[in-house]
Image (cartoon, helix red, strand yellow):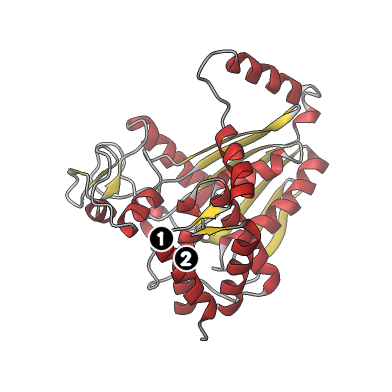
Amino acid sequence: MLIQECALRELGLKIFSVAGIADNLAHEVVNPLVLAELDGIPSHGFSRVPFYVEQIRSGKIYRNAVPVISQPAPALVRVDACHGLAFPAIAQGLQKTLTVARTNGLGLLGVTRSHHSGCMGHWVESMAREGLLALAFTNSPAAMMPWKGNKATFGTNPIAFGCPRAGFEPVVVDMALSKVARGQIVNAKEKGITSIPEGWAVDADGKPTTDPEDALKGAMVPMGDAKGAALAMMVEILAATVNGTNYGYEASSFFEPDGPAPSIGQTFILLDVQRLNASFANQVQALCSFILEQPGTRIPGMRRFETRARSRVQGVNLPDNLYEKLHNLADEKY
Protein backbone atom coordinates (compact mmCIF):
# COMPACT_ATOMS: atom_id res chain seq x y z
CA MET A 1 0.00 0.00 0.00
CA LEU A 2 1.51 3.32 -1.10
CA ILE A 3 0.94 6.08 1.46
CA GLN A 4 2.14 9.69 1.54
CA GLU A 5 4.14 11.11 4.42
CA CYS A 6 1.36 13.34 5.81
CA ALA A 7 -1.19 10.51 5.74
CA LEU A 8 1.28 8.15 7.41
CA ARG A 9 1.90 10.68 10.17
CA GLU A 10 -1.83 11.24 10.70
CA LEU A 11 -2.40 7.49 10.93
CA GLY A 12 0.35 7.12 13.52
CA LEU A 13 -0.96 10.01 15.62
CA LYS A 14 -4.46 8.51 15.59
CA ILE A 15 -3.17 5.09 16.67
CA PHE A 16 -1.23 6.47 19.65
CA SER A 17 -4.04 8.81 20.61
CA VAL A 18 -6.43 5.84 20.70
CA ALA A 19 -3.83 3.96 22.75
CA GLY A 20 -3.91 6.74 25.35
CA ILE A 21 -0.66 8.59 24.63
CA ALA A 22 -0.88 12.36 25.18
CA ASP A 23 -0.89 14.36 21.94
CA ASN A 24 2.39 16.20 22.59
CA LEU A 25 4.19 12.93 23.32
CA ALA A 26 2.53 11.16 20.39
CA HIS A 27 4.13 13.63 17.97
CA GLU A 28 7.55 12.83 19.45
CA VAL A 29 6.84 9.11 18.98
CA VAL A 30 5.46 9.26 15.44
CA ASN A 31 8.03 11.59 13.86
CA PRO A 32 10.99 9.15 14.15
CA LEU A 33 8.81 6.26 12.90
CA VAL A 34 7.79 8.24 9.82
CA LEU A 35 11.41 9.20 9.20
CA ALA A 36 12.46 5.54 9.34
CA GLU A 37 9.89 4.69 6.68
CA LEU A 38 10.98 7.59 4.48
CA ASP A 39 14.59 6.47 4.80
CA GLY A 40 13.78 2.91 3.73
CA ILE A 41 14.40 1.41 7.19
CA PRO A 42 11.05 -0.34 7.81
CA SER A 43 12.47 -2.55 10.56
CA HIS A 44 12.50 0.61 12.75
CA GLY A 45 9.36 2.18 11.34
CA PHE A 46 5.65 1.37 11.49
CA SER A 47 6.24 -2.38 11.71
CA ARG A 48 7.06 -1.61 15.37
CA VAL A 49 3.74 0.11 16.06
CA PRO A 50 1.63 -3.03 16.77
CA PHE A 51 4.27 -4.18 19.26
CA TYR A 52 4.29 -0.79 20.99
CA VAL A 53 0.49 -0.75 21.21
CA GLU A 54 0.33 -4.30 22.63
CA GLN A 55 2.81 -3.28 25.34
CA ILE A 56 0.92 -0.07 26.10
CA ARG A 57 -2.22 -2.16 26.56
CA SER A 58 -0.49 -4.68 28.81
CA GLY A 59 1.18 -1.98 30.90
CA LYS A 60 4.70 -2.99 29.92
CA ILE A 61 5.00 0.50 28.42
CA TYR A 62 3.55 3.13 30.77
CA ARG A 63 1.15 5.18 28.70
CA ASN A 64 1.11 8.09 31.18
CA ALA A 65 4.89 8.29 31.55
CA VAL A 66 6.30 11.82 31.34
CA PRO A 67 10.10 12.13 31.00
CA VAL A 68 11.85 13.60 34.05
CA ILE A 69 14.92 15.70 33.20
CA SER A 70 17.66 16.58 35.68
CA GLN A 71 21.17 18.03 35.46
CA PRO A 72 23.48 16.33 38.00
CA ALA A 73 26.55 18.29 36.78
CA PRO A 74 27.14 21.24 34.44
CA ALA A 75 27.89 19.01 31.42
CA LEU A 76 25.63 16.09 32.35
CA VAL A 77 21.92 15.65 31.63
CA ARG A 78 19.89 12.73 32.89
CA VAL A 79 16.43 11.73 31.68
CA ASP A 80 14.25 9.15 33.36
CA ALA A 81 11.94 7.74 30.68
CA CYS A 82 9.81 6.28 33.50
CA HIS A 83 9.18 3.07 31.51
CA GLY A 84 7.38 4.99 28.78
CA LEU A 85 8.21 5.07 25.08
CA ALA A 86 11.82 6.16 24.59
CA PHE A 87 11.25 8.74 21.86
CA PRO A 88 9.91 11.62 24.00
CA ALA A 89 12.60 11.08 26.64
CA ILE A 90 15.38 11.20 24.05
CA ALA A 91 13.91 14.11 22.06
CA GLN A 92 13.46 16.26 25.17
CA GLY A 93 16.78 15.19 26.66
CA LEU A 94 18.71 16.07 23.51
CA GLN A 95 17.20 19.54 23.38
CA LYS A 96 18.42 20.15 26.92
CA THR A 97 21.83 18.62 26.18
CA LEU A 98 22.17 20.76 23.03
CA THR A 99 21.99 23.86 25.22
CA VAL A 100 24.44 22.33 27.70
CA ALA A 101 26.93 21.49 24.93
CA ARG A 102 26.75 25.00 23.49
CA THR A 103 27.37 26.43 26.95
CA ASN A 104 30.16 24.08 28.05
CA GLY A 105 31.52 22.82 24.74
CA LEU A 106 30.52 19.28 25.67
CA GLY A 107 27.35 17.62 26.89
CA LEU A 108 26.47 14.06 27.85
CA LEU A 109 22.92 12.74 28.01
CA GLY A 110 22.07 9.58 29.91
CA VAL A 111 18.60 8.06 29.49
CA THR A 112 17.42 5.54 32.06
CA ARG A 113 14.41 3.19 32.39
CA SER A 114 13.98 3.40 28.64
CA HIS A 115 12.65 1.34 25.74
CA HIS A 116 13.40 0.89 22.01
CA SER A 117 14.96 4.08 20.65
CA GLY A 118 14.41 3.63 16.91
CA CYS A 119 17.14 4.55 14.41
CA MET A 120 20.01 5.94 16.43
CA GLY A 121 21.25 7.68 13.29
CA HIS A 122 18.25 10.00 13.34
CA TRP A 123 19.20 11.35 16.75
CA VAL A 124 22.82 12.10 15.79
CA GLU A 125 21.67 13.55 12.47
CA SER A 126 19.46 16.06 14.28
CA MET A 127 22.41 17.22 16.40
CA ALA A 128 24.78 17.35 13.41
CA ARG A 129 22.30 19.69 11.72
CA GLU A 130 22.77 21.94 14.77
CA GLY A 131 26.52 22.03 14.10
CA LEU A 132 27.53 19.48 16.75
CA LEU A 133 29.42 16.21 16.56
CA ALA A 134 27.30 13.49 18.17
CA LEU A 135 27.87 9.93 19.36
CA ALA A 136 25.03 7.63 20.44
CA PHE A 137 24.90 4.25 22.16
CA THR A 138 22.01 2.04 23.22
CA ASN A 139 21.78 -1.44 24.63
CA SER A 140 18.81 -3.70 23.94
CA PRO A 141 17.35 -7.05 25.04
CA ALA A 142 19.75 -9.96 24.70
CA ALA A 143 19.92 -11.16 21.10
CA MET A 144 23.62 -11.63 20.39
CA MET A 145 26.14 -14.10 21.76
CA PRO A 146 29.60 -13.15 23.02
CA TRP A 147 32.31 -14.44 20.72
CA LYS A 148 32.69 -18.23 21.15
CA GLY A 149 29.65 -18.18 23.45
CA ASN A 150 26.34 -19.96 22.92
CA LYS A 151 23.90 -17.83 24.91
CA ALA A 152 22.32 -14.50 23.98
CA THR A 153 24.03 -11.99 26.27
CA PHE A 154 24.22 -8.62 24.54
CA GLY A 155 21.65 -6.76 22.53
CA THR A 156 22.46 -5.84 18.95
CA ASN A 157 23.60 -2.62 20.63
CA PRO A 158 23.59 0.02 17.86
CA ILE A 159 26.12 2.81 17.76
CA ALA A 160 25.80 6.01 15.74
CA PHE A 161 27.95 8.98 14.81
CA GLY A 162 26.93 12.23 13.15
CA CYS A 163 28.82 15.40 12.24
CA PRO A 164 28.33 18.47 10.05
CA ARG A 165 29.76 18.60 6.52
CA ALA A 166 30.13 21.98 4.83
CA GLY A 167 27.65 22.49 2.00
CA PHE A 168 26.14 19.00 2.21
CA GLU A 169 23.99 16.74 4.35
CA PRO A 170 25.68 15.55 7.57
CA VAL A 171 27.86 12.47 7.76
CA VAL A 172 25.80 9.80 9.55
CA VAL A 173 27.15 6.41 10.62
CA ASP A 174 24.51 4.09 12.09
CA MET A 175 25.04 0.40 12.68
CA ALA A 176 23.99 -2.51 14.84
CA LEU A 177 26.86 -4.59 16.16
CA SER A 178 25.31 -7.82 15.00
CA LYS A 179 25.87 -8.76 11.37
CA VAL A 180 22.34 -7.46 10.71
CA ALA A 181 19.71 -5.73 12.81
CA ARG A 182 17.43 -8.20 14.59
CA GLY A 183 14.44 -6.32 13.16
CA GLN A 184 15.36 -7.68 9.72
CA ILE A 185 14.82 -11.22 10.96
CA VAL A 186 11.57 -10.23 12.69
CA ASN A 187 10.38 -8.70 9.42
CA ALA A 188 11.40 -11.83 7.49
CA LYS A 189 9.32 -13.97 9.83
CA GLU A 190 6.35 -11.58 9.61
CA LYS A 191 6.46 -11.73 5.80
CA GLY A 192 6.57 -15.53 5.78
CA ILE A 193 10.13 -15.68 4.44
CA THR A 194 11.49 -19.13 5.32
CA SER A 195 15.21 -18.56 4.82
CA ILE A 196 17.66 -15.86 5.85
CA PRO A 197 21.32 -15.64 4.73
CA GLU A 198 23.78 -18.00 6.36
CA GLY A 199 25.99 -16.40 9.00
CA TRP A 200 23.38 -14.04 10.45
CA ALA A 201 22.34 -16.13 13.44
CA VAL A 202 22.56 -19.34 15.45
CA ASP A 203 19.71 -21.40 16.89
CA ALA A 204 18.99 -22.12 20.57
CA ASP A 205 21.73 -24.78 20.55
CA GLY A 206 24.33 -22.40 19.17
CA LYS A 207 24.31 -23.96 15.71
CA PRO A 208 24.21 -21.82 12.52
CA THR A 209 20.68 -21.46 11.12
CA THR A 210 18.95 -19.92 8.11
CA ASP A 211 15.46 -20.32 9.61
CA PRO A 212 14.12 -16.95 10.90
CA GLU A 213 12.04 -18.59 13.62
CA ASP A 214 14.99 -20.61 14.91
CA ALA A 215 17.17 -17.50 14.70
CA LEU A 216 14.78 -15.53 16.91
CA LYS A 217 14.91 -18.34 19.48
CA GLY A 218 18.70 -18.36 19.31
CA ALA A 219 21.18 -15.50 18.97
CA MET A 220 22.61 -13.08 16.43
CA VAL A 221 26.23 -13.39 15.30
CA PRO A 222 28.44 -10.36 16.13
CA MET A 223 29.64 -8.19 13.27
CA GLY A 224 33.38 -8.66 12.92
CA ASP A 225 33.31 -11.72 15.17
CA ALA A 226 35.42 -11.11 18.32
CA LYS A 227 35.79 -7.37 17.57
CA GLY A 228 32.04 -6.89 17.27
CA ALA A 229 31.45 -8.76 20.52
CA ALA A 230 33.98 -6.53 22.29
CA LEU A 231 32.25 -3.42 20.96
CA ALA A 232 28.88 -4.79 22.11
CA MET A 233 30.29 -5.17 25.62
CA MET A 234 31.56 -1.59 25.46
CA VAL A 235 28.07 -0.38 24.53
CA GLU A 236 26.49 -2.38 27.37
CA ILE A 237 28.72 -0.49 29.79
CA LEU A 238 28.24 2.91 28.14
CA ALA A 239 24.46 2.62 27.82
CA ALA A 240 23.40 0.35 30.69
CA THR A 241 26.01 0.58 33.46
CA VAL A 242 26.49 4.34 33.12
CA ASN A 243 22.73 4.84 33.48
CA GLY A 244 22.05 2.13 36.06
CA THR A 245 19.70 0.18 33.78
CA ASN A 246 19.29 -3.47 32.83
CA TYR A 247 21.89 -5.32 30.85
CA GLY A 248 20.65 -7.02 27.69
CA TYR A 249 20.38 -10.39 29.40
CA GLU A 250 18.22 -8.82 32.12
CA ALA A 251 15.89 -6.89 29.80
CA SER A 252 12.54 -8.20 28.59
CA SER A 253 11.66 -8.38 24.89
CA PHE A 254 10.75 -5.36 22.78
CA PHE A 255 8.33 -7.61 20.89
CA GLU A 256 6.38 -9.41 23.64
CA PRO A 257 3.51 -7.74 25.52
CA ASP A 258 4.07 -9.64 28.77
CA GLY A 259 6.68 -9.21 31.46
CA PRO A 260 8.31 -6.23 33.15
CA ALA A 261 9.44 -3.12 31.30
CA PRO A 262 12.77 -3.63 29.46
CA SER A 263 14.36 -0.74 31.39
CA ILE A 264 17.38 -0.29 29.14
CA GLY A 265 19.55 2.79 28.61
CA GLN A 266 20.89 5.20 26.01
CA THR A 267 23.89 7.52 26.18
CA PHE A 268 24.59 10.48 23.85
CA ILE A 269 27.74 12.58 23.70
CA LEU A 270 27.55 16.00 22.04
CA LEU A 271 30.65 18.03 21.18
CA ASP A 272 30.66 21.64 20.02
CA VAL A 273 33.46 21.05 17.52
CA GLN A 274 33.65 24.74 16.57
CA ARG A 275 35.32 25.33 19.95
CA LEU A 276 38.23 23.10 18.90
CA ASN A 277 38.33 23.69 15.16
CA ALA A 278 36.45 26.49 13.40
CA SER A 279 37.15 24.77 10.07
CA PHE A 280 35.79 21.40 11.16
CA ALA A 281 32.90 21.15 8.67
CA ASN A 282 35.14 22.28 5.80
CA GLN A 283 37.78 19.70 6.69
CA VAL A 284 35.13 16.98 6.84
CA GLN A 285 34.03 18.01 3.36
CA ALA A 286 37.63 17.84 2.13
CA LEU A 287 37.84 14.25 3.42
CA CYS A 288 34.52 13.37 1.77
CA SER A 289 35.66 14.88 -1.55
CA PHE A 290 38.83 12.80 -1.50
CA ILE A 291 36.82 9.65 -0.81
CA LEU A 292 34.27 10.37 -3.54
CA GLU A 293 36.98 10.84 -6.17
CA GLN A 294 37.42 7.07 -5.94
CA PRO A 295 34.89 5.19 -8.13
CA GLY A 296 32.18 3.27 -6.29
CA THR A 297 32.57 5.03 -2.96
CA ARG A 298 29.91 6.84 -0.97
CA ILE A 299 29.69 8.78 2.27
CA PRO A 300 27.82 7.21 5.22
CA GLY A 301 24.28 8.56 5.32
CA MET A 302 24.05 9.46 1.63
CA ARG A 303 21.85 6.51 0.73
CA ARG A 304 19.25 7.26 3.40
CA PHE A 305 19.06 10.93 2.39
CA GLU A 306 18.56 9.96 -1.25
CA THR A 307 15.86 7.47 -0.27
CA ARG A 308 14.16 10.07 1.94
CA ALA A 309 13.99 12.57 -0.92
CA ARG A 310 12.41 9.98 -3.25
CA SER A 311 9.95 8.81 -0.59
CA ARG A 312 8.73 12.36 0.01
CA VAL A 313 7.74 12.51 -3.64
CA GLN A 314 6.62 8.93 -4.29
CA GLY A 315 5.28 7.95 -0.86
CA VAL A 316 6.07 4.98 1.38
CA ASN A 317 5.13 1.44 0.45
CA LEU A 318 3.70 -0.38 3.48
CA PRO A 319 2.94 -4.12 3.25
CA ASP A 320 -0.82 -4.59 2.81
CA ASN A 321 -1.18 -6.73 5.93
CA LEU A 322 0.64 -4.11 8.03
CA TYR A 323 -1.47 -1.29 6.58
CA GLU A 324 -4.64 -3.20 7.47
CA LYS A 325 -3.35 -3.92 10.96
CA LEU A 326 -2.51 -0.25 11.53
CA HIS A 327 -5.96 0.87 10.41
CA ASN A 328 -7.56 -1.63 12.75
CA LEU A 329 -5.51 -0.22 15.62
CA ALA A 330 -6.59 3.32 14.70
CA ASP A 331 -10.27 2.32 14.76
CA GLU A 332 -10.25 0.27 17.97
CA LYS A 333 -11.80 1.44 21.19
CA TYR A 334 -10.32 0.36 24.48
Depth check, front residue: 251 or 24 = 24
Residue pointed to by mark 1: 251
Residue pointed to by mark 2: 323
- Secondary structure at badge 1 equals loop
Q: Is residue 30 left or right of residue 129?
A: left
Q: Amino acid at mark 1?
A: Ala
Q: Image height check: is 277 above or below 247?
A: above
Please tell me how crowded label 2 is: few (under 14), some (14-19), or many (20+) other residues with Cα within 10 Å: some
- Secondary structure at badge 2 equals helix
Q: Does any portion of residue 80 appear in the rendered image?
A: no
Q: Kindly indicate the quadrant of the structure image that contains residue 330.
A: bottom right
Q: Image height check: is 246 above or below 173?
A: below
Please give the name of the residue rendered at 39% of the width and 63% of the height, measured from the top-left corner.
255
Please give the name of the residue rendered at 55% of the width and 35% of the height, measured from the top-left corner.
303
Q: Measure the alpha-carbon separation of dots 1 and 2.
A: 30 Å
Image location of residue 77, percent across then percent down: 69, 52
Depth check, front residue: 156 or 239 = 156
Q: Amino acid at mark 2?
A: Tyr
Image location of residue 37, percent across then percent down: 54, 52
